[in-house]
Amino acid sequence: MGIVVRQGVKGTVVTYLGVLIGAINLLWIFPKFLKPEEIGLIRVLLDIGMVVAALSQVGAGNIADRFFSHFRDEEKFHHGFLVFLLLFPLLGYLFIGGILLIGETYFIEFYQQKSALVSHYFYSIFPLAFFLVYVGVFEAYSRIHMRIAIPAFFREVLLRLLLAGIVIVYYFKLIDLDGLVFLLISTYAINFILLCFYIKFLGRWYLNAGYLRAKVGLIKEIIYYGLFIFLAGAFGLIATKIDIIILSAYTGLKLTGVYTIAFFMGTIIEIPRRSLSQIVSPLIGEAWRNNDFVKIDELYKKTSLNQLILGVLLLLLIWGNINELFFMIPNSEIYIAGKYIVLIIAISRLSDMVTGSNAEIILNSPFYKINFIIVIISGVLTIAANFILIPKYDMYGAAFATFISFGIMNFIKSYIIYKKIGLHPFTKETLHIILIGGGIFLLLECVPEIGNNNIYWVLFSIGLKSFLTIMIFIFLVYYLKFSAELNNIIDMILQFIKSKLSKR
C-alpha cells in the first residue's frame, strides 16, 4: 500500500498544481496574448482531437485496468501486453481516421461559413489525435504499474507550461498561426516521447510479442469488452465536447473563445468531486463485494452532503466576486459577455455534486451494464439539445444544453439506484445547506461593488467578500453540525492553532 499512498498523494498535488496553472493560462495568459477566435481555435482543435483519440483507443485504457492481471508475468514480458496495447488502438486510429478522411468535405462545409480556420487546419487533427491516443495508452500502462505521478506531471503541469510558452512566443510574433498550431501538436509529441522514455526507465518496455500467442483466447474477450467500452465512451466523450464543436460551427470562433473562458470558471466548483470520487470508488466497490448496503448508503449520503457543502461554498465565492474576477481578466470587456454562463455551468455541476456518488455506485454494481444505456441516452440528449439551442441562443444555448443534460442524467442515475436498492443521497441537511447557500447568495447580490476601476480596490473587495462568505457559511455549517467530517477537520485546525498559541 506504500507505493499506492505515495503515488496517490503525489498525483493529487500534481493535479491541483495543474489546475492552478490551467487557471492562469485560461484566465490571464490566453485572454492577454490571444484573440478570442484564437482561443476558440485551440479549444476546438483539442476537443476534436480528443474525441478522435478516444474513439481510436477502443477502450485501451479500460482494457489495461481490467485485464492486466491476466497477463502479469515479468519473466514472460507480461505476455506481450504492451504490444497489444500499441497495436489495438492503432487499428482503431486507422479506422476512425479513415472515416474522418471520407467525411472531409462535410467537415469543411460544416465549419467553412463561421469558423473557416477550423477547416483550414483539418489535417492537423490527425497527428494531434495520434499523439493523444498513445499518451492515453502509455498513461494507462504506467497506471497499472502503480506509477501515476510522473505521467500526471507531464499532462497536468508540463503540457500547460509549454502551452503558455507557445502562446507568449506567438504574441511576440516569433511564430505565425501555423507555427502556433504546429507547436501545439508538438507539445503532445513531447509528452508522448517523455512517456516512452519513462516506461523504458521503469524497465517495463516489453516489445516481445512472442508470448502474446499464449493469450489468444483471452484476446477475444478483451476485444468484446473494448468494443463495449468504445460505444459507451464514444457517446460519453462526445456529450462532454459537443458544445464547443457545434458552437464554433454555428457562431464562430470568437464566441467559442468567450464560452471557453466562462465554461472553465463554472467548472471550478467540481474540483472537490474529482478527488472525492477517486477516494470513494474503491470503498463502494468493496461494499458491493460484501453486499454491505448500509455502507453504500452511508457513502452515498456522505459524498452528497460534503460535495454539496464544498460546491455551494465555491459557487458563492465565484459568483460573489464574479464582476471582480472578470475585471482581472485581460480584455474583460469582451469576456464579460459570458458572465451568466459561469452561473449556469456552475449550477449544472452542483446538480452532479448533490447527487453524490451515483455514477460510482452504478459502475461498481452488478447492474453496471445499465451505465451503457445511460451514457447513450446522455449522449443523444446532449447532442440534440446543443443542435436545437445553439442556433437560437448561441453560447447560452450551449450552456443551457449542458444544464439540461446534467440535470436529467443525474435524475435518471439516482432514480435507477433508488429502484434497484432503495437508496437515495438526500437528508434533511441537504435542504438546510441549500437554504443557507441561497440566503447568502441573495445577500451577496445586495452588496454594492467596490472600486471596479482600480486593481487594489478590486483585490480588497475580493478578499473582504471571500472572507465574510467563508466565515458566515462555515460557521453556520459547523455550528449546526451538518457534516461530522467537516467538523472534525475544523476541530483539528482549531486545536492546532490553540496548541501553537499556548506555547507562546
Image: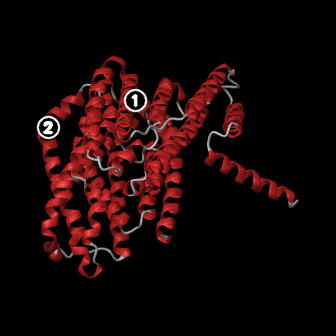
Q: Where is residue 440 in the image (x, y as percent from the top left)?
A: 65, 26
Q: Left or right? Give the position of 487 relative to 268.
A: right
Query: Is 75 situated above or below 439?
Result: below
For the rendered model, the colour scheme is secondary structure
Amino acid type at circle 2 is Gly
Q: Where is residue 7 in the image (x, y as percent from the top left)?
A: 48, 65
Circles 2 and 1, Cβ within 8 Å, touching? The answer is: no
Disc tally is 2
- Report the residue at 36% width, 19% height from top: 393
Q: In which quarter of the image is the C terminus?
A: bottom right
Q: Residues within 10 Å of mark 1 (few under 14, many from 20)?
A: some
Residue 250 in sight in this render: yes
The secondary structure type at the circle numbered 2 is: loop
Q: Left or right? Give the position of 99 relative to 358.
A: left
Circle number at residue 407: 1
The secondary structure type at the circle numbered 1 is: helix
Residue 22 in sight in this render: no
Q: Position of residue 460 (x, y in %)?
A: 72, 34
Of 59 and 255, nearer the camera is: 59
- Report the residue at 53% width, 44% height from top: 302
Q: Left or right? Give the position of 307 relative to 214.
A: right
Query: Is 294 situated above or below 410?
Result: below
Of 147 and 324, nearer the camera is: 147
Q: In which quarter of the image is residue 382?
A: top left
Q: Distance between the residues labelled 2 and 1?
A: 33 Å
Query: Is 226 situated above or below 380?
Result: below
Quickly name the residue at label 2: 103
Q: Left or right? Give the position of 501 relative to 60.
A: right
Q: Which one is earlier in the sequence, the residue at label 2 or at label 1? A: 2
Amino acid type at circle 1 is Gly
Residue that lies at the very extreme toward the top in this rendered image: 392
